[in-house]
Image (cartoon, coloured by chain):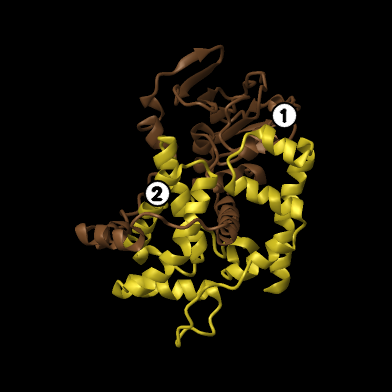
Chain colours: A brown, B yellow
Amino acid sequence: MPVHHLSDELLLDHAAGSLPEPVALLVATHLALCPACREHEAGLEAVGGALLDEIDPEPIEGGGLDALFARIEAAPAEDTREAEVAAVKPAASDIVPTLPRPLRDYVGGETDALAWRKRGKLSEARLLPEASGGTVKLLRIPAGAMMPVHTHRGTELTLVLEGGFSDEQGHYLRGDVAIADEDVTHKPRADDDGDCLCLTVTQAPVRLAGPLARFLNPFLRD
Amino acid sequence: MGEQAIEPDKLMRSEPPAEHFATLMDAVAASRDRSAFAQIYDHFAPRLKGYLRRRGSDAGQAEELVQEVMLTVWRKAGLYDRRQANVSTWIFTIARNRRIDAIRRERRPDFDPNDPAFVPDGEPSPDDALAASQDGAMLRRAIDDIPDEQRKLLHLAFYEDKSHNTIADELGLPLGTVKSRIRLALAKVRRSIEEEV
């Protein structure tokens, strides 16, 4: 189980549906590996649900309920099918993929499906090149190597997928998230017992989707 | 927050609102009960419209999304599990996801509990007071009890879509203060639920 978790602010923005896709990808991949953060997020969603009850209602002006029942009658066959599909669970597999979903879907398979580029000792592969709101990369760091010095324009999130690394703040293994703010200079070094594979997201200093994320980002403040 | 507008149904009179909606959901799932669904619709559809309007949808788009969310509530009623979440929370997450799919035109990355790489909940599962609180009314009371400024931050996070400048102007707070107030707000809500349970 991971020991280094997502922050309250990130989970809150994720629960509110306010994170840009690159950050949401890292958060959802951590959630696949971290029961504690899933539980934590479920709590934040409950806060969202409670606040929904308090919101000022706006009257429905269109066809409302009658129009909805008309739609249901027009396509009644879909009712049960979705529930049945959801109830079918695939057989458990002994092989644990290195990349959990949703990351595996974005990569389109395992890591050899990607175009890797050498940068010094490291290899990197860019994901979601078109997305706004953050730069997403998979990084492979050879055993014992230092990770690149970060420019830290905006927050950088690193999720370990294989192997591990250490910095001043601790030791990170599969599922752990390191969060580096602008004011943190850390010098991560990959463990000696094997290559380290990480997903990193550098949040772009501008154009973060969430009002809270925007507000919390000091680069945007006057 | 006024009285909940709930029909004084003879069977459900004494139930708290969250339990009441869960019972209605069970009726929709078990017997496609239209009058039960109508009560759910009357309560939630106008609130969902309010939510979507605050997050930037125009009136027409908001109404279309409300219909899609409520259609999902009807169709997936069988997947609702009252032990997992109260009805408000379940409907909120459906609306949040629909909004991302429809408005942002992005993929919405989500984990898959059937993925062999998925790490399932341990036994016993970690206990978060907020997640464990099935009683929406209790949670609302806890939220009502926190200081106005902290509650406002939670509202901004979930239900507003304003530029950071507007929010900064409105609150006039430095960054560190905002972060620590969010943490304080959540900690206080958790504590107050733990005391009540």
Cα separation, mark 1 vs mark 2, equals 34 Å
User: Residue A99 versus residue A157: which sits nearer the camera?
Assistant: A157
Quarter of the image for residue A178 reads top right
Q: Residues within 10 Å of mark 2 (few under 14, many from 20)?
A: many
Instruction: State the image coordinates of residue A166 (x, y, percent, origin top left).
Output: 67, 32
Q: From the image, which quarter does the N terminus of chain B lie in?
A: bottom right
**One can see residue A4 in this view:** no
Q: Is residue B195 above or below residue A20?
A: below
Name the kind of residue labelled 2 in the image: Leu
Where disc 2 sits, the SS reads helix
Q: Tag on residue B65?
A: 2
| Residue at image location 30% in from the left, 63% down from the top | A66
Q: Is residue B141 left or right of residue B113?
A: right
Q: Are marks 1 and 2 in contact (CB under 8 Å)?
A: no
Instruction: Give the x, y percent position of residue A22.
Output: 51, 32
Which of B79/A72 is in front?
A: A72
> Mark 1, residues whose alpha carbon is within 10 Å: few (<14), some, or many (≥20)?
some
